Amino acid sequence: MAGDRGPAEGATPGQQVPVTVSIEEGHDIDEVVRKLRRAGVEVNEVFEPLRLLIGRARADLLAAVRGTTGVAAAEVERQYHLPPPESDLQ
Amino acid sequence: MQPRFRLLAGGACSSLGRGDAAKRSVTIGAKEVGIAVPGQPFGSAGPDPEPGTTGRFLVLLDQDDLSSGTIAVERAADVRIADMADLPAGTTKAPKGADGILFPELGVAVVDVAPGARAGLQAVAMENSAVHVVEAERYVHATALLAPSMGQSYLEGYRDAVNALVNNLIPASNGRAERMVGERVPGERAVLSWDESQLAWGLQAIGVPESAFSGRGVKVAILDTGIDLGHPDFAGRDITSQSFIPGQDVQDVLGHGTHVAGTACGRRQPTVLPRYGVAYNADLFVGKVLSNSGSGTDGQIIAGINWAITNGCRVVSMSLGAPVDVGTPPSTVFENVAQRALAKGTLIIAAAGNESSRSQGKISPVGHPANCPSIMAVAAIDEAFGIADFSCGSRNPNGGEVNIAGPGVNVHSSWPMPTQYRRIMGTSMATPHVSGVAALLAEAKPDISAADLARLLESTAKPLPPLPVSDVGAGLVQAP
């Protein structure tokens, strides 16, 4: 296994980056999703059992996303890369 | 965030070995190693003056129902157990009039049991849901040979005696030369010779051959590169699969996922020996979250976790990760995911990471997402019970600790056809050993919560002195 820190590093302020957003307990998921959409977040999928959504947002709007009522955390997606299959270390 | 699985790091107990009748310990250099020698006592050859058990028993109780478990043990074994909360700090022996001590924070009672009552004590663990595990307490002599008065010649003489005995007990397979216990090839790490004609060494090391469990009725999710559905060892197996990689089916073209799935859930009788799978009767769920080029994203992994939870998987095995720096906190998003998984009965087990180069003095921190407090982080050990050179360590707090270790070097398992089998190494290989054992424990304790399943994995692991807890957590995972 191996990986890197994801596409966030080096993103320009206006660049769209993939994000994961965790929604706090006690808040209506649909309502939080509506707020985030109004704030410019492109919501691709909502995982209700996990109270989590994945989507895309402008890098310079991440602070606003994190400050949205009902948002527990918002993170830029990381990427994972396995070593080449011929490697003995996996 | 509070670490969820830090209750039992093995410190309060001497050792929780498995299969005592068939396994004894020898000390090679600085390491205590268990060698499985079916039907043959082995300890008598060593210098250990008091091999075997102490006569006391360790009883792991349900943390949420300590009082019922304690009463059940008292009745079953006709003993009286004192509560450590009522005793002076530092007490290690039962007070007068009592036969044992309950350590409420650990959920463990240490009890002296008369020989005639031991069967009753073992039975109560099977019958009473408030009593999880009963183990004979064992002596640990890991440092016995490290005394300054014992020189190298003594150690070498002892090693030679062990080698001779092992060679007498284990016939060489196919006439090939076996490497000696503790033999070092120049430039290589210490090696320990295992007879793998029937069973991969990792399965022997974690007590799978002695286990009465197979993971029957337990759903295990492997989130990885998919699986080779055409592999003869998975033919006829009822596999539920789903790809989370757009445009790619679940068929594994890289091999990583097929290898990992094989270790966790490979069949009991593979097409070609040795057996390499732990939970051979588990219901196998394969989620492809890493692409045919070996890449994936947080979102794809989360989608896989969500699928596993929705399907009622009790174990999610993730041999994947991304490196983090010293000082990097765990992901709040993944910690929330893992806590919600636990609440729904699903335990996530993840690889600690391969970024260390210990031989060059570099120990890298446990990677993401294994560094979340509510995700079990798995380190890798080698065949001589040493920490693997690449295995990440506990460099960060708040979840960045290693929880447990599994066999992760020279691991034989399935590989996409036509290769069929391959030996590779990594914490990716150690992780499915732990996931497979989690399935065995979940079968043994069907009503246990996911958080208690994690605690049970840790409390039944075998400490690996002198390896530090920061490298191997509670120690080497052990099958029930």
Image (tube, grey):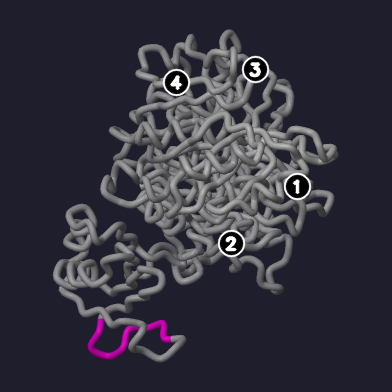
Q: x, y (%) of residue A32?
A: 52, 45
Residue to which mark 2 is pinned: B465
Q: Callout 2 environment at 10 Å: few (<14), some (14 to 19), or many (20+)?
A: many
- The secondary element bearing badge 4 is classed as strand
Residue to which mark 1 is pinned: B356
Query: In the rendered view, does A13 fall on the left or right side of B282?
Result: right
The reply to whether the C-beta atoms of the residues labelled 3 and 2 are less than 8 Å apart is no
Point 55% across, 62% down: residue:
B1
The reply to whether the C-beta atoms of the residues labelled 3 and 4 are less than 8 Å apart is no
- The secondary element bearing badge 3 is classed as loop
The reply to whether the C-beta atoms of the residues labelled 4 and 2 are less than 8 Å apart is no
Report the mark closest to the observer, 1 or 3: 3
Point 33% across, 44% down: residue:
B442
Residue type, mark 4 in image: Ser
Provide the residue span drawn in magenta. B91-98
Q: Marks 1/3: CA distance?
A: 26 Å
Residues tagged by mark 4 and mark 2 found on one chain of the structure: yes
Report the mark closest to the observer, 4 or 1: 4
Residues tagged by mark 3 and mark 4 found on one chain of the structure: yes
On residue B292, the disc is 3
Residues tagged by mark 1 and mark 2 found on one chain of the structure: yes
Which of the marked residues, 1 or 3, is nearer the chain's N terminus?
A: 3
Report the mark closest to the observer, 4 or 2: 4
Is any part of residue B380 visible from this angle? no
